[in-house]
Structure formats: C-alpha cells, structure tokens
Image (spheres, rainbow, N blue to C red):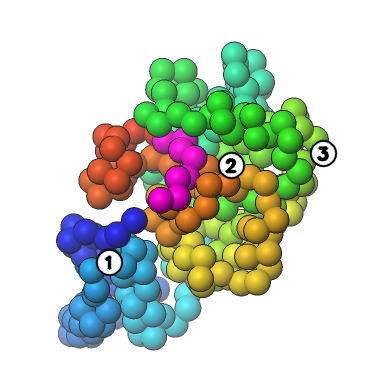
Amino acid sequence: MKAEYECIGCIIKHTQSLIEKADKTNKISSEKKFEDYKKVISDLIKNLEYGKRPIELSVSQYDSIYELYGKQDFFINEKTNANQIFLEMYDDLFYFIMNSENPLKTAAKLSAISNIIDYGVKNSFGELEFEIETMAKKRKFAIDDFKSFNEKLKTAKKILFIHDNAGEIVLDKLFIKTIKKFYPDIIIYSAVRSAPIINDATLKDTDEINLKELSIPIESGSVYPGTIFEKTNETFKNIFEKSDIIISKGQGNFEGLNKTCEKIYFILTAKCSVVSQELNVKVGEFVFKRDVVI
C-alpha cells in the first residue's frame, strides 16, 4: 500500500514521542531536543516520495534517531512488563479458546484483539482477561477469510508466522498452540525483528515467553517496524518461499507485505484512516484477510 499525506503527520508525531523517550534516559537539554527534532524532520523530508509504503517513509526517521542516541532499547521495560501481563492469563485464555465453538478462529481473534491493547494496561482483578474474552465473544472479523485459511491448514506442512509487538506475541503463541493442537505435525517458524525497535518483538521476547516450545524463532533481518521483504535476510526469504502459509500480524507488517503473496493471511486491527480505507473497513475493526496480488 502507498503512503498518503496523513502518514507524514503520523511519523512527525511519533518522532516527538521517540525524542521524549530518549530524554528519559539521556537527559537532553531543551536546545538539543529542538535541534534533534529539526534534524529528524529534515532527514524525513529529504526521504519523502509519493508511492512509497508508510514504513519506507519512516526508515530515515529511525536512522536519524539511531544516529543521535545510539541503538538503545527504549521500550525494554514496557515490553517485558507486557509479556508478563499476558503470560499471567495464558493458561486461562487457552482454556477459553479450547472451550469455544471454534477454537482455531477464537485463537485468531484473540491474536487480533491483542493488537489494540494499551501497553500501560494492567490485569487488575482479571479485568483485562475478562475484556479480551468479552471482545472475542461479541466482535467479528470485518474481513473474514478464515474458511480459506482453515482449508489450507489441512494440507500445510510449514507455516511462517511474522510477529509484531512484544506482549501481544503471547497471544500469537496461543494461536500457534491451538494450530499445533489440531495439526501437531506442522512446522511453524516465528519471525521477529533483528534489533530492538520501538515495542516490536525480538528474540529476547521469544525467550521470555518460551516460544521455542511451539515454534522455531528466527530473526527476519528487519531492523525497522514492519516487514519490507527486500530488507529481510536470506534465512527469512528462504522460509518465506518454502512455507505453505504465512501469517502476518499487525498493521506494520500489512503495510510492507500487502499485495505481495497470496500465501499470506493478515491478522490486524485497522488503527488509522489510511489502513482502514485501504481495507475498506472502519478504524478499530478486526481483520483476517488473505492477500490478493493484483
């Protein structure tokens, strides 16, 4: 999908939040923050070109942030906390899945729901767990290609799951566990980012949630949010080509991989007007969509 003019404002707003995050660990002076912000925006403007994908536009933003502050994991505490919160409800949610009318579809829906959970949320008195289960019962996929996915599972031998954020990767694990429950012989690979970038999952997160008990974690080669196929490593490309099904989680991965391969099934929540218009759904709706290559 192509970036629209609204994407520029989103990237600029995100730049401010990244500098504020850097300020908490680096104690940056007001003048330096001003000059740093100006530099990031200046570099961004030089990279702007209509026809690029949204995540391609943001590459210069992250390169500039790395140049200014080094490759720090600014969200390390938030990611670990999110992983632990979801792990606390892991067993209960798996019980909920297996006792639902359609466990595989329920697990897919929980994966989509996790895409909208706020990082600051707590599971006080089980309220978050109750909210997730309630949404799973009441909400439907605005685009629902699950029947096609279910048919593909019957003959699949290899699946590549491209993950998005920490925290929600625990609910992705639940989806993987449910797939393995019904199709134990399927080999599943779990692709994560190759370096810390905002709240995206890395191998550290796969270790924290013990993902290797169900799938084979790999680095995608991507050091930016989302997945740009051309910027992935050879291991990822090889597994991508040989997989029978590819599950792409989250909006960033959708932005990079949309209309590239009909083996892909996108699971996401439409979080902005640009993506919702691309999908022809409302902002906030859940999507389970098979890719269409035009």
The magenta stretch spans residue 291: yes
Mark 2 secondary-structure assignment: helix
Circle 3 sits on which residue? 185
Mark 1 secondary-structure assignment: loop
Question: Where residue 218 sits: x, y (%)?
Answer: 67, 61
Q: Is residue 272 visible?
A: no
Residue 263 or residue 58, whichever sits in front: 263
Question: Where residue 7 sits: x, y (%)?
Answer: 23, 60
Q: Quadrant of the N terminus?
A: bottom left
Q: Is residue 85 above or below residue 74?
A: above
Mark 3 secondary-structure assignment: loop
Question: Where residue 91 sits: x, y (%)?
Answer: 66, 30
Q: Residue at x 73, y 35 (%)?
A: 155
Judge depth for marks 1 and 2 and give the one in front.
1
Please identify the quarter of the rendering in which residue 235 is found: bottom right
Q: Is residue 275 above or below residue 73?
A: above
Q: Residues within 10 Å of mark 3 (few under 14, many from 20)?
A: few
Magenta part of the protein: which range?
Answer: 287-294
Amino acid identity at mark 1: Gly
The magenta stretch spans residue 277: no
Task: Describe residue 92's horizontal placement relative to residue 33 as left or right.
Answer: right
Q: Residue at x 42, y 35 (%)?
A: 287
Amino acid identity at mark 3: Asp
Task: Describe residue 27's horizontal placement relative to residue 173 as left or right.
Answer: left
Circle 1 sits on which residue? 51
Task: Describe residue 118's horizontal placement relative to residue 180 as left or right.
Answer: left
Name the N-terminal-most of marks 1 and 2: 1
Circle 2 sits on which residue? 172
Q: Is residue 51 visible?
A: yes
Name the N-terminal-most of marks 2 and 3: 2
